[in-house]
Image (spheres, rainbow, N blue to C red):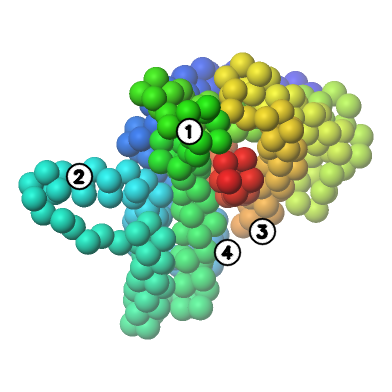
Amino acid sequence: MSGRFEQLIPRVLVAVVAIPAILWLTLQGGYYFFALVAAISALALHEFYGLTRAKGAAPLAVIGIGSGVLLNAAFIYERVQVEVYTAFERMGVRLSMFSQNQFILVLLLVLVAIVLLVELFRSKGSPLINAGATVLGVLAVGLAFGTLISLRELFPYGFPAYKFFPNGIATDAQLVQIDRWGGWTVIGLFASIWMCDTAAYFGGLAFGRHRLFERVSPKKSWEGAVFGFVFAVATMIVVKLLALDYLAMRHAVVIGVLIGIFGQIGDLVESRFKRDAGVKDSSSLLPGHGGIYDRFDSLVYLAPIVYLYVDFIVLS
């Protein structure tokens, strides 16, 4: 058991440094949060491509990571569009710009076209495997992190004030409150994932008897998974009570359930990739934690689900 605790000190030290920075940037939102997520996304995608190389693929990493960052930027495009359009309008110039959905579609189509064209003339490995690994990374990692940005941007740019304020139009003070809700919604997501991971780890360590998915992750247990699920739901309820007045309790519970289930599935998906690649961690970038992809694997799978629930159910 002591061997399983030996990484606890570096894990805690990394968390003490990283968590306050992540929370501050999340509350700031806007370009600060975009920069945070784009950096995490790029590093996670770099590590994902490392896993595919271990299986013999030769992904177009520069093209893939660059496309991933641009895809992240697509989810802050509405903010950029408003600011650029307003600046030009003050100069008497009216711009015609892509919508956000058009920008995403064009970006993905251009990505596929470029990858296929490069592989046409490339003589390294299998073009089919290389192209598949490159595009899958952008979609599975870059697009997933993009939805996290979109979740944060829903509040300054997609929040239906008429549903939550009596006068139907938000005052300046209420606009500040809406933006703060956006920050705390994402922080609630982070906190629930972290508590889920921590509770599953220690719950499994203390009570784990029945293997959850031994072929994929031999150390995970059903007992640990249940601990993680309960703490994910409880954490989301606490965040709702402390900071999210707009969020009905039933929605907080549902989001906690989604985190408790799909967050752990995301962890298993990455474990399956690593086992297939024959590696323990996606990298050794974070002492005690492994790589960026290791630390945010739950989020990669979960962010699109929570974004869709908040956008189409909670705020619809």
Amino acid type at image mark 1: Gly
Cα–Cα gap, marks 3 and 1: 53 Å
Of badges 2 and 4, the one in the foreground is 2
Q: Between residue 248 and residue 280, name the one nearer to us.
A: 248
Disc 2 and disc 1 in contact, CB within 8 angstroms = no
User: Which residue corresponds to mark 4?
Assistant: 55
Q: Nearer the viewer, mark 2 or mark 1?
A: 1
Tell me which residue sits at (36%, 23%) in the image: 172
- Which is nearer the N-term, disc 4 or disc 3? 4
Residue 192: x and y, percent?
A: 65, 29
Q: Name the residue under label 3.
A: 276
Compare marks 2 and 4 and give the one earlier in the sequence: 4
The reply to whether residue 34 is visible in this rendering is yes
Of the residues tagged 4 and 1, which is closer to the observer? 1
Question: Are dots 2 and 4 in contact, CB under 8 Å?
Answer: no
How far apart are the two marked residues, 2 and 3, measured between alpha carbons?
50 Å
The CA distance from mark 2 to mark 4 is 49 Å
Find disc 2 in the rendering and name its residue: 86
